[in-house]
Amino acid sequence: MEKTALISQIQRFAVNDGPGFRTIVFFKGCPLRCKWCHNPEMQSFTNDIYWKKWLCVQCGACFDACPQHAILPPVPVEVARREGSSYHKIDRSKCNNCLECISACSYGALESAGKAMTVEEVVKEVESDRLFYENSGGGVTISGGEPTVHGEFVRELIDALKAKSIHICLDTSGYVSWEVLEPLAEKSDIILYDLKHLDSPEHERMTGVPNELIISNLHKLSAKGCSIWLRIVVVPGYTDSVEYHRRVVGFLASLPKPVERIDLLPFHNWCEDKYGWLGRKWPLSDIEALDPAEVDHLLEIYTSEGLNATIGGSGFENSESAVA
């Protein structure tokens, strides 16, 4: 039987995740639980079901179809859609993701957050954008979740794409064994490396894991001479101080070889709906999104040291004001 992996989404025409126009393959599954995670549907290693309340007419078809009795009985539509309503269609403690409810729904209110795909299927889909890659200097970005947890599948995917001369960016948190990361890094053109925090206790408080492995892997990638684009999400009260970014500059100077660039990604809260679709609360809902202009003073800390840095991570030149 051909190997498959759960793919949450394949996003086209992205410009903030590597050079040129890119197609991003988002893998499900991540060992981190970042409090600011903008892709909660990619955290679990199994399929998830979205419930979109504004599309739900409370017809009861999903209730009748569910063999696990994980669907709550219909309620008046206005009750379910009311602002601040605590009603959620799915009892997640009973759901085994059999997806029978999705098959029964005629209104698109229930939707799968993942799809099992083979390497061949992924390659076929992303190769359809080849013209855009060639005209813009773009390619495919392999992301997640944490794509390296699908190490063998990702290795085969990269091999298949490189055989077709498609440029590869690997987006990783670095929280993976070096034995898995090294061969993937060697095959990738650029490593998009997500630096969550320099301090291990603070890193663990905000992501659920310590950072020693992440820092060690970054040093090893640097020593190998990999092309590294360091990505830092600027989160108010966590990674938004001048003092912290000066420390990052000092840390970067300690690496064996310089990183190619640093992308500062302003915190946003556009993901709050997705948490609701999963029946979860967005933990940082009380924090306002940052305007890119609010990060300008942090950008200057890097550029004043001669470092190549952007706001938003745009893959095109002269785009330091791009929105994350």
Image (cartoon, helix red, strand yellow):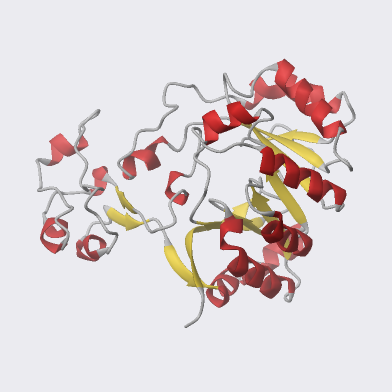
Q: Is residue 296 left or right of residue 57?
A: right
Res 203 seen here: yes
x and y percentages locating residue 81 in the rendered image = 21, 37
Residue 139: tell me if it is visible: no
Left or right? Give the position of 245 relative to 308: left
Residue drawn at (32%, 56%) of the image:
111
Q: Residue at x 40, y 32 (%)?
A: 282
* Image coords of residue 297 (percent x, y): 74, 19
Position of residue 280 relative to residue 18, above or below, is: above
Residue 169: image quadrant is: bottom right
**Residue occupying the point 23% across, 65% down:** 100
Q: Residue at x 89, y 42 (%)?
A: 256
Residue 52 position (above or below residue 272): below
Given residues 153 and 235, the one toward you in this image is 153
- Residue 294 image position (x, y, % from top left): 64, 20
Work out whether residue 32 or residue 5 is closer to the camera in this orientation and state it. Answer: 32
